[in-house]
Image (tube, rainbow, N blue to C red):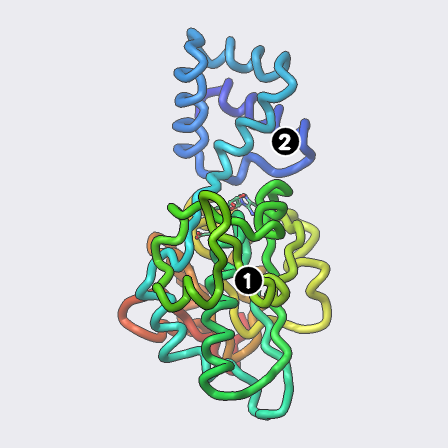
Amino acid sequence: MGETVVDILRFLTDHFGEDFHSYSQSLAEKRIAERVKQLRLPGLSEYHQFLQRDCGEPAYLSRMLRIRFSSFFRDPLQFELLRSQIMSSLLPASSQGGFLRAWSAACAGGEEPCSLAIIIDETLQMLDVHPKVQIFATDVAEDALEEGRAGYYATGSLGGVTLQQLKTYFTPDGTGYRISPKILSMISYCRHDLLDPHTYAPPESLFGGFDLICCRNFLMYLDPQAYLRVFDNLFRALNPGGVLLLGKAESVPERYHQHLVRIFECGNLYRKQQTGRT
Ligand SMILES: C[S@@+](CC[C@H](N)C(=O)[O-])C[C@H]1O[C@@H](n2cnc3c(N)ncnc32)[C@H](O)[C@@H]1O
């Protein structure tokens, strides 16, 4: 990485008090070069000066580096496998109660936790069981969490939603759709920085591990050491027998191959073995 890209990342790290060095080098270089071009600046040192001068620029660049894109049921096959083949195995044994705890880590504007909540609700209705469901949805970006809490989505993000789900769980509102209060009430949005070295899971989720963790399309943007560090935390937070969903371009590090077993050939879903220790 050129000296000036390192300087730019150091500036962001100092400015926000958050880790900007753990994103992959090539991603940081590409994104910063894109921004330099957008602003029609001659080079990186001019951009570095601009970043220090313009009070809105640090937030703008941090958003570019952290890539916000998401959509409902992004990777429909993965969600279908979860719904039709796995979900019922994650429910507590007692039909009268118990807990189901899920974590959508790096949840963007809530499309992923809402997709999970819809699948969980459909399964509970079908089996006529009523456990207490807690879905923690976390992201480092406060404005993403605000979007999640507002529960309002542009039509373009609803690509993977079926007509039946659209009728049951959404209400048209202006140019978009509002998620139903029932789904919203299943989700707790809170800020959690997955690169924070001091916590391994959202503090709000204390008292117990998770039966289901979704961490999709975030790890792929990290350098190899940070990838392992975050993965260690996810593994630790997952209950034995629990299920982990990764993004299409993400995989289980070798040291976890024995402890996290791929459930199907496709779909990137893994189950933590009952004796899952490293
Ligand atoms: C590409 S989106 C993925 C959204 C969703 N998981 C999906 O697959 O559709 C990446 C998300 O990671 C979040 N993110 C980036 N750095 C993070 C960090 N250090 N801790 C937690 N979330 C982070 C971004 O704010 C963004 O919302």
- Residue 278, given in percent of the width and then of the height, sits at 53, 70
Choose top left, top right, bottom left or bottom right for residue 25.
top left
Q: Residue at 45% across / 31% down in the picture?
A: 28
Q: Is residue 45 left or right of residue 86?
A: right
Query: Crowding at label 1, few (<14), some or many (≥20) Cα neighbours within 10 Å?
Result: some
Choose top left, top right, bottom left or bottom right for residue 251.
bottom left
Label at residue 28: none
Where is 2 relative to 183, above or below?
above
Label at residue 13: 2
Residue furthest out toward the left: 265
Residue 229 seen in the figure: no
Q: How many numbered marks are there?
A: 2
Q: Is residue 75 left or right of residue 117?
A: left
Q: Residue at 56% across / 70% down in the picture?
A: 238
Front position among marks 2 and 1: 1
Query: Crowding at label 2, few (<14), some or many (≥20) Cα neighbours within 10 Å?
Result: some
> How far, Cα to Cα, is label 2 from label 1?
38 Å
- Residue 109, given in percent of the width and then of the height, sits at 53, 48
Helix or strand or loop: what does disc 1 sit on? loop
- Residue 95, given in percent of the width and then of the height, sits at 57, 92
Q: Residue at 41% across / 66% down in the picture?
A: 165
Q: Amino acid at mark 1?
A: Ser
- Please name whichever residue, 206 or 112, is drawn nearer the observer in this view of the structure: 112
Q: Residue under label 1, please give it.
A: 180
Helix or strand or loop: what does disc 2 sit on? helix
Residue 69 seen in the figure: yes
